Amino acid sequence: MIKLLLRRLAQGVIVIFVLKTITFFLVRMLPGNPFLGERKLPQHVMDQLNNLYGLDQSAIVQYYNYWKGILTNGDFGPSLVREGLQVSTIIAEAFPVSLALGICGMFIAIILGIPAGMLSAYYRNRWPDTILMLLAMLGICIPAFVIGPLFGKTLGNMPGLSVAGWDNPLCIVLPALTLGLINAAYLARLTRGGMLEVLAQDFIRTAKAKGAGTFRILFIHALRSGLLPAVSYLGPAFAALITGSFVVETCFQVPGMGLHFVNATTDRDYFLIQGLVLCYGILIVLANLIVDLALVALNPRLRAQGTA
Amino acid sequence: MKTPQYQQGNSLWKDAQKRLFRNKAAMMALYFLIAMFVACFVLPLFPIIDNPNTTNLDNIAAPCSMQHPFGTDQLGRDLLARVLYGGRISLLVGLVATIVALVIGLIYGLISGYIGGRTDALMMRTVDVLFALPFIVLVIVFSLSIEQPSRELTEWVISTTGWSRESVAPILGLVPLFIAIGALGWLTLARIVRTQTQEIKSQEYIQAARSLGLSHIRILFRHIAPNLMGTVVVYTTLAVPGIMLTESTLSFIGLGVKAPNSSWGTLIKEGADRMEVTPELLLFPTLFFCLTLLALNFLGDGLRDAIDPKSAKD
């Protein structure tokens, strides 16, 4: 277990380093620059700005300075477009928003998706299965950016719910529901597949023969290994939450990391883009780590091998 | 399970075909997709479809009529024409990006699986690392950063071939998307191809081929690659909807297909902005987009059940 954890952590560090390096040099290639606002700046002002932010140095030097800033005092640099704001301040404000949204979305996805998948597997090829799987297919095919505005239109008028902003706790309902439904659809399909595979095995037949009830068979015998495909999807699901958050935060104007990232790419805010990408990278690595550990916990066979 | 495959030889594909034809959902999906392709790529060649960019400010946001079956948008453009031309772009991005991903994934997986050993371990660890990267974030950054080179490419094509800007620019404007989505979407396929290659490599007819003195290249492309085609076809079909979804998501947040092009994603975006006033603007592009994705998924599932019956659990 410890060995696995260490290996995964080492791999995570490599992932983050690669990601950081790729984005650093890609961002340098972006056309345009952050100081091209509505007003055209004279060349000497532009030079001064570039000098101030160190953008006139060679890429290698900038790359070195960037890592030095982060590792010595956690400095992600200033925002180039929003004057006077540090990238770390922006992220510190936006991160809890996105985290709350992501956790609620994931929670909705799990409480809807996994029971739906289990029901489907239990009623295999009968009408509840057909209906649920059709719904899941629809959930996969209807993109978040359609579900979002539709919710805004239909549910947004309900008292207390809000379609935009982040000024009261109920604002989270619609964005989280939108995020949750997309992942619920994938989870339902995977849970169904996993459960079907388990339910076809001999030990389930034995349990039935010994007179175990439906409930006991589904929840005690089958669920643990039937959940494996769904749990291994949770890593990618986390990445899907990030994609979803771009759309959902843009739709509902939620001031989270997704909205900042979309704006930062259009504004060419180099430091903000890099800070956010780094943050996403760390989140994904952590999520994958947790998923790996959960898989080992659910599937003792992996523990015996010592690898995953 | 395995022996009949070798005895029947060629009829494996016929079997698959038979199974596919029996699957009603998959066949309907197939017919729907063919119809959609004809509608998006062939229909606009005839003058019955309006020019999607002709504005008519006297006829803004018109409801459905004989002349404009889907009505018109906020600038008086015919919505049917816009949906069909948007479909062109969406399907084109979906297909080309998938082909890019397919070529990279296939070659990478073949090499990794065939060589094996340390090379294989290194190549697969690389895939693991890439897998852990936030895909969409990289697509965005990558597609933006190759915009400038692709603009230079456009200029170069115009100056060397002498084609008009109107005919060249829209297609070449999509190149960053093709490359960005495709270049980052090959990972799953590479893994699948590698596993299959390893399996096939250990079979006796490959040993026979080797003892006859065939070159590695010939074994790879003549004896291993054709046997991968089933799996590859299935996962390619299943990859297209995901890639189309990525494209439309990017277009929705304003980072994908750019003017003068419009894809289903941009149309849905425009529609969502105006859904209070004219819900048709959201309805029709969404319907076309969702039905196409649905059909692709059903066809992919059907193909998987037909070609690889073992993996079909229901």
Image: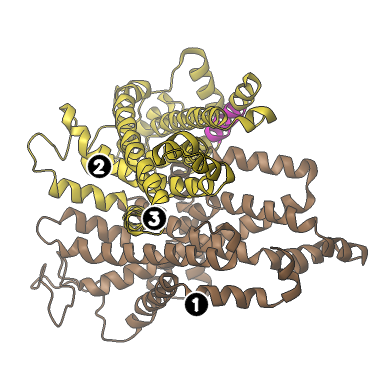
Chain colours: A yellow, B brown
Instruction: Using the image, tell me which numbered label, if any, was put on residue B21.
Output: 1
**For the residue labelled by badge 2, is the local secondary structure a helix, a strand or a loop?**
loop
Looking at the rendered structure, the kind of residue marked 2 is: Glu
Write the start and end of the magenta stretch as one range: A11-21
- Pointer 2 residue: A38
Looking at the rendered structure, the kind of residue marked 3 is: Leu
Pointer 1 local density, CA inside 10 Å: few below 14, some 14–19, many at least 20? some
In the depicted structure, whether residue A251 falls above or below residue A12: below
For the question of whether residue B152 can be seen, the reply is no
Q: Quadrant of the C terminus of chain A?
A: top right
What percent of the width, then of the height, locates residue A46? 37, 33
Mark 1 → mark 3, Cα distance in angstroms: 27 Å
Say left or right for B253 vs B214. left
Looking at the rendered structure, the kind of residue marked 1 is: Phe
- The structure residue drawn at horizontal position 39% and vertical position 74%, both measured from the top left corner, is B28
> Subunit of mark 2?
A
Pointer 3 local density, CA inside 10 Å: few below 14, some 14–19, many at least 20? many
Instruction: Using the image, tell me which numbered label, if any, was put on residue B245.
Output: 3
Total labels: the figure holds 3
Pointer 2 local density, CA inside 10 Å: few below 14, some 14–19, many at least 20? few
> Subunit of mark 3?
B
- The structure residue drawn at horizontal position 45% and vertical position 56%, both measured from the top left corner, is B243
